[in-house]
Image (cartoon, rainbow, N blue to C red):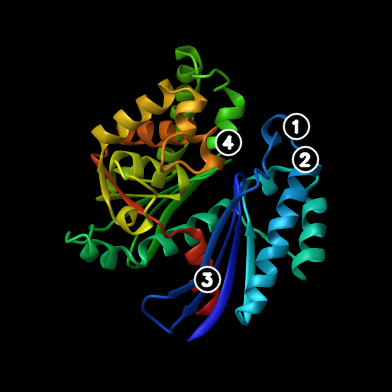
């Protein structure tokens, strides 16, 4: 058993997992945290990480570093993704991480982000299905990780990744680019859909999505849509992990979110405060990709790149 800590710093949130990982089989969580720091604030428009966004991230990272030490993690890996890859001043961010964590972050490529997401998402699918009384979803899997700045599409099975593509559509990026109304206008939604479809054409050129038997959806936009579709009275990761949400329910939830004011979204009992402003775009990405690719349901995973980082670090 190896105790490790993984940190995933994305465009919208920074997350920590401290886990005990055996040589094979399921890992055991000791601590799992998520804080919305909006590191990617303004990156799509300016190409730069805002100083206040770096400072928000630093404060949370300092807490994570201390918790990993307190819990006795023998190795730590921090992965930084879309917002950091895009920023011309990423050196400022990396210098902050060295000063705070004591090591450089791995600014990973879209391909590695996809592979780590696939590993983390699929490792526990069978156990999650059994917990819900369902048959395990069948491979090949199309794993889709909807982030703040980018979305990763990965096709694979038990032998690993067959094909992957990262495209620059994410809930923060598309919200900042198009969805300015409260609620957004029909024209703003249409322009967002156009951007999503253009990105999906890039995905289809690189990933044979028609080969997928099961769609597996990851990250906060997908899990929030699932919580709303399941009509949960409060966010419940055990109820969400492994749940299967039909495309009709995804459409209904997306329509409701895009018609809602910010105040009504904030009042939804499953809504994390940091997702209130961007959940409409995240849900729209999921709805459009399911419709465009003809996918009838999404299997929802609470495990993702964070778990993939921990598994690869320990093994």
How far, Cα to Cα, is label 3 from label 2?
A: 29 Å
Which badge, 4 or 2, is on the more N-terminal residue? Answer: 2
Assign a secondary structure to mark 4. helix
Check residue 50 in the rendering and tell me which mark sits there, or answer none. Answer: 2
How far, Cα to Cα, is label 4 from label 2?
A: 14 Å
Check disc 4 and report the residue beneath it: 172
Label 4 environment density (alpha carbons within 10 Å; few <14, some 14–19, many ≥20):
many
Q: Tell me: 248 left or right of 82.
A: left
Image coords of residue 179 (percent x, y): 54, 23
Label 1 environment density (alpha carbons within 10 Å; few <14, some 14–19, many ≥20):
few
Image coords of residue 77 (percent x, y): 63, 69
Which badge, 1 or 3, is on the more N-terminal residue? Answer: 1
Which badge, 3 or 2, is on the more N-terminal residue? Answer: 2
Residue 169 in view in this figure? no
Check residue 310 in the rendering and tell me which mark sits there, or answer none. Answer: 3
Check disc 1 and report the residue beneath it: 46
- The reply to whether discs 4 and 2 touch (Cβ–Cβ < 8 Å) is no
Instruction: Tally the marks.
Output: 4
Label 3 environment density (alpha carbons within 10 Å; few <14, some 14–19, many ≥20):
many
Q: Nearer the viewer, residue 273 or 240?
A: 273
Which badge, 3 or 4, is on the more N-terminal residue? Answer: 4
Farthest residue to the bottom: give it: 1
């Amino acid at each position: 058993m190896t105790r490790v800590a993984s940190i995933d710093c994305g465009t919208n949130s920074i997350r920590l997992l401290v886990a005990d990982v055996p040589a094979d089989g399921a890992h055991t969580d000791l601590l799992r945290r998520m804080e919305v720091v909006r590191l990617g604030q303004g990156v799509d428009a300016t190409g730069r990480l805002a100083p206040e966004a770096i400072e928000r991230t630093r404060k949370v990272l300092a807490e994570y570093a201390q918790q990993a030490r307190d819990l006795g993690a023998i190795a730590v890996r921090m992965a930084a993704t879309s917002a950091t890859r895009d920023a011309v001043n990423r050196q400022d961010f990396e210098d902050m991480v060295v000063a705070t964590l004591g090591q450089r972050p791995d600014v990973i490529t879209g391909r590695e982000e996809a592979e780590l997401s696939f590993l983390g998402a699929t490792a526990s699918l069978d156990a999650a299905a059994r917990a819900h009384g369902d048959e395990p979803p069948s491979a090949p899997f199309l794993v889709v990780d909807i982030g703040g700045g980018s979305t990763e599409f990965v096709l694979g099975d038990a032998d690993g990744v067959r094909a992957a593509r990262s495209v620059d559509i994410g809930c923060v990026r598309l919200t900042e680019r198009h969805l300015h109304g409260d609620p957004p206008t029909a024209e703003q939604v249409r322009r967002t859909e156009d951007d999503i479809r253009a990105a999906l054409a890039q995905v289809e050129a690189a990933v044979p999505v028609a080969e997928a038997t099961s769609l597996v959806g990851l990250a906060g936009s997908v899990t929030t849509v699932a919580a709303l579709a399941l009509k949960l009275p409060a966010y419940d990761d055990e109820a969400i992990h492994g749940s299967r949400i039909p495309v009709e329910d995804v459409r209904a939830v997306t329509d409701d979110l895009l018609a809602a004011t910010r105040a009504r979204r904030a009042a939804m009992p499953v809504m994390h405060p940091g997702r209130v402003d961007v959940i409409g775009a995240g849900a729209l990405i999921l709805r459009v990709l399911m419709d465009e690719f003809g996918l009838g349901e999404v299997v929802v995973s609470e495990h993702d790149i964070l778990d993939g980082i921990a598994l690869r670090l320990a093994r």
